[in-house]
């Protein structure tokens, strides 16, 4: 695998997209309707969908890893105490699940085996 500027650009764009999804999920994960943690569910689904899309569309583990690193770094940066003393990710069950689920999700998508190339369909013979 040779280096190319196109691949580096893809990794950079994947990182930025992952950071945007990670930021959105970090902000929205604590939304709940009654007992249903709707924000956490939708945030995890969105992050899983973008990771799978990057992996499938680029056929490159490194692009999916770049998107995942963007998500994890956004979560890390915004989970600490801000300069005004505010905390976006509180030390609650939802916050802990969000903080742990993203690296596990990235690991699953990046480590998933590559799909074999598709064969041309062979027409069935008429009996």
Image (spheres, rainbow, N blue to C red):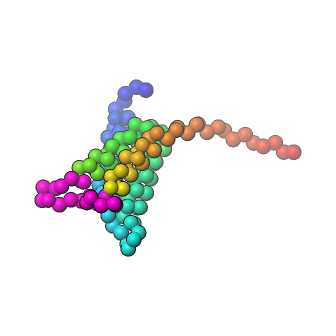
Provide the major secondary structure of the magenta segment. loop
Q: Quadrant of the C terminus?
A: top right
- Residue range of the region highlighted in magenta in the rendering: 79-95
Quadrant of residue 3 within the rendered picture: top left
Picture residue at 21% right of the left edge, 59% below the top: 87
Quadrant of residue 98 within the rendered picture: bottom left
Task: From the viewer's side, name the closer residue of 77 and 90.
Answer: 90
Q: Quadrant of the N terminus?
A: top left
Picture residue at 34% right of the left edge, 35% below the top: 8
Task: From the viewer's side, name the closer residue of 88 and 6.
Answer: 88
The reply, left or right, for residue 112 in relation to residue 21 is right
Where residue 12 appears, as percent x and y from the top left, is: 32, 40
Where residue 84 appears, as percent x and y from the top left, is: 12, 59
Picture residue at 32% right of the left edge, 47% below the top: 72
Q: Is residue 33 above or below residue 19?
A: below
Q: Is residue 24 something one can see in this rendering?
A: no
Picture residue at 37% right of the left edge, 61% below the top: 40
Task: From the viewer's side, name the closer residue of 111 and 116.
Answer: 111
- The extreme bottom residue here reads 34
Is-magenta flag for residue 88? Answer: yes
- The extreme right residue here reads 127
Is-magenta flag for residue 91? Answer: yes
């Amino acid at each position: 695998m040779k280096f190319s500027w196109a691949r580096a650009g893809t990794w950079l764009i994947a990182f930025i997209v992952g950071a945007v999804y990670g930021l959105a999920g970090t902000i929205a994960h604590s939304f709940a309707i009654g007992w249903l943690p709707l924000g956490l569910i939708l945030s995890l689904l969105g992050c899983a969908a973008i990771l799978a899309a990057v992996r499938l569309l680029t056929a490159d583990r490194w692009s999916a890893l770049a998107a995942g690193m963007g998500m994890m770094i956004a979560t890390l940066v915004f989970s600490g105490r801000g300069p005004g003393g505010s905390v976006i990710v509180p030390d609650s069950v939802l916050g802990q699940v969000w903080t742990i689920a993203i690296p596990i999700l990235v690991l699953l998508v990046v480590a998933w085996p590559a799909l074999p190339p598709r064969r041309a369909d062979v027409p069935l013979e008429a009996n």
